[in-house]
């Protein structure tokens, strides 16, 4: 494995180009009083873009990424970027953490001290972790797959080879969203490699449900709500699942379009009744995440996963994983499947906790709480 240290240096010309584009923004009109009903509001975007243009600290952004060991390695012709942080504890558990969409490895940085050195933060020193936090292929600093049909299972194979080359024959995992999809499929394909798998997206990937199967009332209610959610919120997924290249021109060329596209999801998938998402995340974190997509020009590659999902071999009849499974539920109704639904794919659920708070990006929103959930799951595994 061609492993090499990675240090990202932002070119001044790239910032100058960004600022010029922000200064030249042609702002759209807006229905008076429309607010979030029509999408992301004009005053919200003006405030966030003013912050990006005049207040965002690029030096602090670079230092926050460089505070941990970053690496790049080539696997099957693709560059994979990852952070690798060793624990200070005894007998640490290797833990692969996969981020979601539209997000990057950056949202997971605040988990690091809680998981690698839990004692000072009030955690149990009995369980600590060596962390491997990659940029998923097509996201952030990893390579961009420029071939048709690159999908979740292929991404999982690259991550499995990464863990092998790092010397981890068995390891734990945590993920959500696309990260959960990739990790869940890895648990199906390579169950012997996993110590255990924890997620805050327990319905992803979805289990196979035979049309003749009898579903519980709770499962029926959950699936009905999923359909309603998709009708109301899933327009982006339909566009990206059918014509991602058309959307790419605006997202790739306009920083305001890119930021609106990403920040809308962080708002609606966190607390749609609260019109200022920075009450849940700092403006720095929100803009840092957008900046990674902008600087690496990776939004089109990340969006293509929706289109390439048609090529993914999703769980089929009778397919299930024996990997010990841990679930932490957030407060988002569409991410709260009943336990019997999850157990169709992961019958070995040994940990099930309902936080009744937080949104889709809960690891960034409540890092101490999610780190405690991850540690509690693996502690239970170790004690059992």
Image (cartoon, helix red, strand yellow):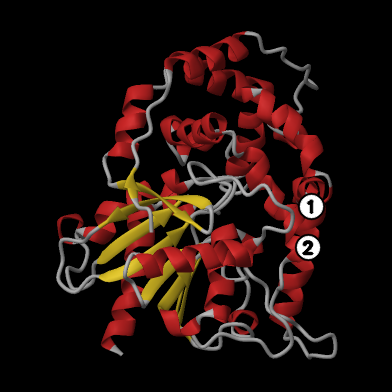
In percent of width and height, residue 153 lies at 62, 67
Query: Nearest the camera: 58 or 332?
Result: 58
Compared with 293, 338 (above or below) is: below
Which residue is label 1 attached to? 241
Compared with 366, 87 (above or below) is: below
For the N terminus, which image quadrant?
Answer: bottom left
- Residue 310 - label: 2
Query: Nearest the camera: 245 or 24?
Result: 245
User: Image check: 72 left or right of 342?
Assistant: left
Whether residue 269 appears in this view of the structure is yes
Query: Nearest the camera: 236 or 282?
Result: 236
In percent of width and height, residue 355 lies at 46, 65
Q: 10 Å neighbourhood of mark 2: few (<14), some, or many (≥20)?
A: few
Q: CB under 8 Å between callouts 1 and 2?
A: yes
User: Image check: 313 left or right of 109?
Assistant: right
User: Image check: 150 left or right of 234?
Assistant: left
Count the numbered circles shown.
Answer: 2
Q: Residue at x 62, y 82 (%)?
A: 345
Numbered disc 1: secondary structure: helix
- First of labels 1, 2 by sequence position: 1
| Residue 61 position by quadrant | top left
Marks 1 and 2 sit apart, C-alpha to C-alpha, by: 8 Å
Q: Residue at x 49, y 54 (%)?
A: 99
For the C terminus, which image quadrant?
Answer: bottom left
Query: Nearest the camera: 287 or 20?
Result: 20
Whether residue 273 appears in this view of the structure is no
Compared with 32, 309 (above or below) is: below
Q: Which residue is drawn at 60% across and 25% down?
A: 44
């Amino acid at each position: 494995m061609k492993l090499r240290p990675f240090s990202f240096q932002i070119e001044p010309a790239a910032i100058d180009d960004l600022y010029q584009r922000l200064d030249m923004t042609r702002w759209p009109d807006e229905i008076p009083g429309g607010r979030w009903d029509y999408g992301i509001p004009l005053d919200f975007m003006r405030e966030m873009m003013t912050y990006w243009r005049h207040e965002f600290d690029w030096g602090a952004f670079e230092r926050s990424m460089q505070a941990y060991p970053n690496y790049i390695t080539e696997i099957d012709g693709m560059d994979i970027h990852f952070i690798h942080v060793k624990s200070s504890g005894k007998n640490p558990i290797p833990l692969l953490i996969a981020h979601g969409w539209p997000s990057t490895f950056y949202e997971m940085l605040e988990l690091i001290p809680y998981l690698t050195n839990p004692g000072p933060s009030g955690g149990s020193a009995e369980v600590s972790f060596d962390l491997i936090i990659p940029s998923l292929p097509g996201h952030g600093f990893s390579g961009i797959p420029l071939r048709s049909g690159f999908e979740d299972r292929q991404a999982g194979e690259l991550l499995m080879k990464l863990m092998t080359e790092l010397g981890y024959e068995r390891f734990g995992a945590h993920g959500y969203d696309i990260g959960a999809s990739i990790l869940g499929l890895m648990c199906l394909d390579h169950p012997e490699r996993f110590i255990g798998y924890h997620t805050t997206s327990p319905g992803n990937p979805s289990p196979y449900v035979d049309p003749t199967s009898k579903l519980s009332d709770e499962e029926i209610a959950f699936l009905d709500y999923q359909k309603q959610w998709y009708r109301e919120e899933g327009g982006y997924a339909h566009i990206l699942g059918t014509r991602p290249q058309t959307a790419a021109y605006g997202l790739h060329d306009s920083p305001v379009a890119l930021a609106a596209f990403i920040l809308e999801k962080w708002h609606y998938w966190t607390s749609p009744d609260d019109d200022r998402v920075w009450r849940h995340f700092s403006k720095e974190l929100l803009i840092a995440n957008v900046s990674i997509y902008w600087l690496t020009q990776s939004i089109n590659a990340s969006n293509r996963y929706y289109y390439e999902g048609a090529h993914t071999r999703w769980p089929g009849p009778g397919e299930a994983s024996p990997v010990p499974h841990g679930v932490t539920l957030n407060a988002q109704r569409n991410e709260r499947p009943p336990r019997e639904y999850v157990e169709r794919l992961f019958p070995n659920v040994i940990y099930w906790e309902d936080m009744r708070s937080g949104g889709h990006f809960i690891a960034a929103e409540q890092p101490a709480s999610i780190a405690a959930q991850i540690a509690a799951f693996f502690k239970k595994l170790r004690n059992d």
